[in-house]
Amino acid sequence: MAARRLSALLLGLFFTVAACADEGMWTFHDFPQALLKQQHGIEISSAWLDRVRTATVRLSGCTASFVSPEGLILTNHHCAAACLDEHSSDQQNLIKDGFLARTRETELRCATQVADVLMAMENVTDKVEAATRNLSDQAANDARKKTLTQLEQACEQGATKAHAKNAELRPLKCESVNLYQGGQYWLYKYRRYDDVRLVFAPEEGIAAFGGDPDNFQFPRWCLDMSVLRAYDSHGKPAATPSYLHIRPEGPKAGEVVFVSGHPGSTDRLLTVAELEELRDVTLPQYVQRASELRGRYIQFGKTSPEAHRIVENPLLYLENTLKVRREQLNALLDDRLLQHKREEEAALRAKMASSGGTADPWAAIAKAEQLDRQQSLSYTYLEAGAGFNSRLFGYARTILRGARERQKPNAERLREFRDTALPRIEQQLKAPIPIHPQLENLTLSFSLERMREWLGPDDAMVRKLLAKDSPDTLAARVISGSALADPKERMRLWSGGMQAVEASQDPMIELARAVDPTAREIRKRYEDEVEAPIDAASEQIARARFRAYGTSVPPDATFTLRLNFGTVQGWKEGDHQIEPFTGLSRFYARATGQEPFKVPDSWLAAKGQLDMATKFDLSTNSDIVGGNSGSPLLDAQGQLVGLMFDGNIHSIAGSYWFDPELNRAVAVHPAIILEGLRKVYKADQLLAELGLK
């Protein structure tokens, strides 16, 4: 893997105050239309923004877009992998073989998927600031959470009442959004579709051609696409008049393009102390754990064809995340980059001092990070769950904590159990997701081993759990004896509340019960000693930044809707120029006949009918990160000209800074989508609905 080669000039560009080049994951309510016109001579209207916003969809961990007036949703193949896996078995592997519903009656329900569309946004910063004014850090932290819960609840209740009076006004899901590390608070109001069905997905061999070796590389040849459909509460295809028209010929080199999506998270506004914590503690520990688990996954997958199918999706996710974390760590190990961050902090500190400020929020954060280092292992393994890597344990903890939290007033609960979050929890608990005991045993025993290793055999919790058990025997006992793989049993306990949970002798519930008091104590200490002072200090820094620069710097990504602009272009890797397009002919030439470079049989059979000049994938300098998977790539008219699915290896450092010379995003070209649907899959009905027949 190539090291980042950044000149001093480029390093200076990363930390300029105002956005430079095409950097920026901008909110729709603060999109810099004037900057776009200045840099590219393009004007987009408020109507353009509204249409794109309501055509963009948030899925679980991904982005998508409406591409027909009857609820068709275009996203990536890997964003539908959980749904494909849910409907697979040892007789039928939909991830490997693909799926096409030729009628709406045969579309497959994705039990845990939801589709959210951002309908409105409300700035509630003043309300949050009023609730926390003149309070201690700990009291302000508690008050902030209560206020956000109350605002979300009032928002949803108001929407429900409005719907009762006017059926055309749909109920809304309301979520609070923290921007600029506490500089702004917003309520984002979504239309939620909780009935999402699978329409089409190609074979994994074409969707993820090149596998892990090609991941975060370019040139690429991946048809990383799938098509879903949203249904309304009456079981009919959703009416989605704000949808994107596909421009089959795609964009030209140098053309200005836009990405509308939900980037997961960036840390560009963190302090040096926070970045050093990531570099020294969080990332190294994760990389070590994940590397070991990856090896166990690979060995497990070799034991049988069924084991390979079971572990395939978890392994793909783990390998992707591991590669991201490794590159993030490499980026933070570049001392020159942290030095520029120190210089940026010094400049903002000077501006803060010149305006009469006496507090030192950077020092407060550094102090809190030192406390975090002391607590990080216990928090990671006991509260964050690294010691209990098991889907069944996750169910048990959710049921146990949910029963306890729902006894409290809504505003006093843990935030993940507020009233507005309960419908989503219930959807996940009742979903008939397959549980594979072999994989559960592997992950739980592994995580218990690592907990014993890192906390030590004399740690109180380790001794409590493993006094008479080994990690292997404890994992085997609680997994084999648990009934939580049955959705009916999960819902019986959830509906029965505290009485049912206290009476339960399910060994996985008992394990969660044994861990919970200590885990809660650790969480409370973290919230009071680390989270509270960091949040208070971050708000001070945000206010200083606003006074100095306004909103000319975009906020960090928070898996909320953003829009960025860039151009279709390649880049120079050393002395080699990377072109921005790949073609179908090179796809066949690159195949080896062995995984992960094996062409699916359907594409081999259709080879003689295909146009070898068809463009396959393309690269842009769009500023995106994880969560943008499935985002539509748009032209200036708001037409879909690509489907984002990856970035190059340099883009991973985009978590911390944007390098206009090297950061590139990768998209599926619409021409290959059309060619594949028409000639390989004979999906005439789907093409007609997409307006492409």
Image: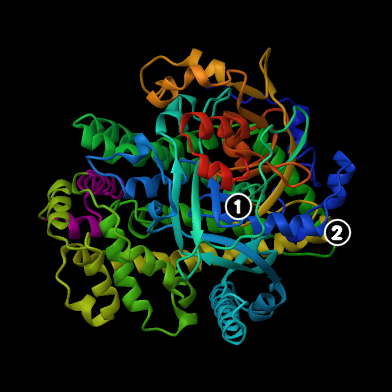
SS label for mark 2: helix
Residue 446 in magenta? Answer: yes
Residue 660, image x, y percentages: 73, 33
Left or right of residue 413: residue 63? right
Under mark 2, the amino acid is: Ser
Answer few, some or many: residues within 10 Å of disc 1's Cα (few below 14, many 20 plus, some between 14 and 19). many
Left or right of residue 63: residue 350? right
Residue 336, image x, y percentages: 67, 32
Q: Which residue is mark 2?
A: 354
Q: Which residues are magenta?
A: 439-467
Residue 455, image x, y percentages: 30, 50
Q: Are marks 1 and 2 in contact (CB under 8 Å)?
A: no
Q: Is residue 656 above or below residue 11?
A: below
Q: Residue at x 19, y 49 (%)?
A: 437
Q: Nearer the viewer, residue 590 or 198?
A: 198
Q: Is residue 93 visible?
A: yes
Numbered label tally: 2
SS label for mark 1: loop
In whole angstroms, how far apart are the C-alphas of marks 1 and 2? Answer: 55 Å
Q: Is residue 54 above or below residue 157?
A: above
**Mark with earlier residue (1, 2):** 1
Q: Is residue 545 visible?
A: no
Q: Residue at x 22, y 66 (%)?
A: 509
Q: Nearer the viewer, residue 538 or 491?
A: 491
Under mark 1, the amino acid is: Ser
Q: Nearer the viewer, residue 580 or 504?
A: 580
Q: Nearer the viewer, residue 372 or 78?
A: 78
Q: Which residue is mark 1?
A: 68
On residue 151, the disc is: none
Residue 122, image x, y percentages: 70, 71
Q: Is residue 198 above or below residue 532?
A: above
